[in-house]
Amino acid sequence: MLQVAIPNKGALSEESVALLRDAGYKCQRYGRELMVTDRENQIDFIFLRPRDIAQYVGNGVLELGITGRDLALDSAVAVAELLPLEFGRSRFCYAVPQESSLTPDRFGGLRIATSYPEIVRRDLAARGLEAKIVRLDGAVEISIRLGVADCIADVVESGRTLLEAGLRIVGEPLLHSEALLVGREPAVAELPAVRKMIARLRGVLVARAYAMIEYDIPRTALEEACRITPGIESPTISPLSNPDWVAVKAMILKKESNRIMDELYGIGARGIIVCNLSSCRI
């Protein structure tokens, strides 16, 4: 039976469970269970601390896991990135007080507070610097004000928390992170159950990015309509009872749906409908 680790709490957990559920897997907890078995798909889903997942997978205890790239890199254990999951996106950055003129190349000898010491250690080594790394488990942004550190390195999403703490980002991000499906080695992706999971997850991710649009259009405007909605291979065109009109169906990028509807209506399309997709393979 395949064993897959997923985060036991937080946004990573919620979005991982939602993605797996949309892909046809049963991994919903009803309490604080540490393991949920999906008997239909022959998979044990094991709920672990997000920070520990790379350790279990990289050391070969479990075949697969879902965790953040930042957490995987900070674990100092090698895991194979099998599929980016397009949620939990963030940057990992240095930050200093708003009034400070410090830059990362001048961090030598300073105190850097972070919850990701391995990532910071590697970056300092690449810069040829030595600094004191102050490991904290949370609320890193307050450490400068409390006199614990001179600068920090932390995960940044919107940047609002840093701004509220009187800090600003300096230098380029150390890395860009997001949730990943990771394996103990690249070869694990060739296991039949893993291939199926990757295909299902990819199908859901593609479906989240696309929508299906349907509309009626006069034949005289069909060529222009097909230019606006070319679809994946080509749009589906069906005759209507009125020989001067046809029905068109095509996949479009969801983020462009309103613009496309505007353009179609402008050339005479009517009965325009946009529908969400639950999964697809293209």
Image (cartoon, rainbow, N blue to C red):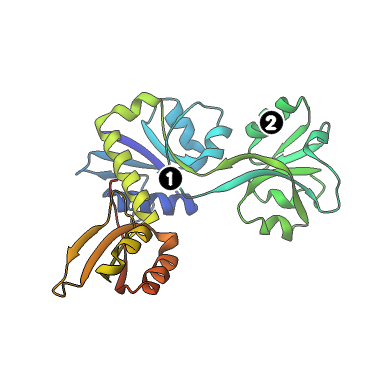
Pick the front one: 245 or 230: 245
Q: Which residue is mark 1?
A: 85
Q: Amino acid at mark 2?
A: Asp
Residue 177 vs residue 180: left or right? Answer: right
Q: Secondary structure at mark 2?
A: helix
Q: What whole-number distance in Å separates the C-alpha atoms at marks 2 and 1? A: 25 Å
Percent from the top left, x then y, of residue 222? 29, 64
**Which residue occupies 33% across, 42% down?**
45
Percent from the top left, x then y, of residue 219? 25, 68
The N terminus appears in which quarter of the rendering?
A: top left
Whichever of callouts 2 and 1 sits on the residue coming sooner in the sequence is 1
Q: Are marks 2 and 1 in contact (CB under 8 Å)?
A: no
Q: Which residue is mark 2?
A: 123
Q: Amino acid at mark 1?
A: Leu
Percent from the top left, x then y, of residue 194? 30, 34
Above or below 42: residue 76:
above
Residue 110 vs residue 199: left or right? Answer: right
Above or below 279: residue 249:
below
Alpha-carbon neighbours of circle 1 within 10 Å: few (<14), some, or many (≥20)?
A: many
Q: Is residue 194 visible?
A: yes
The quadrant where residue 258 appears: bottom left
Alpha-carbon neighbours of circle 2 within 10 Å: few (<14), some, or many (≥20)?
A: some
**Which residue occupies 47% across, 50% down?**
87
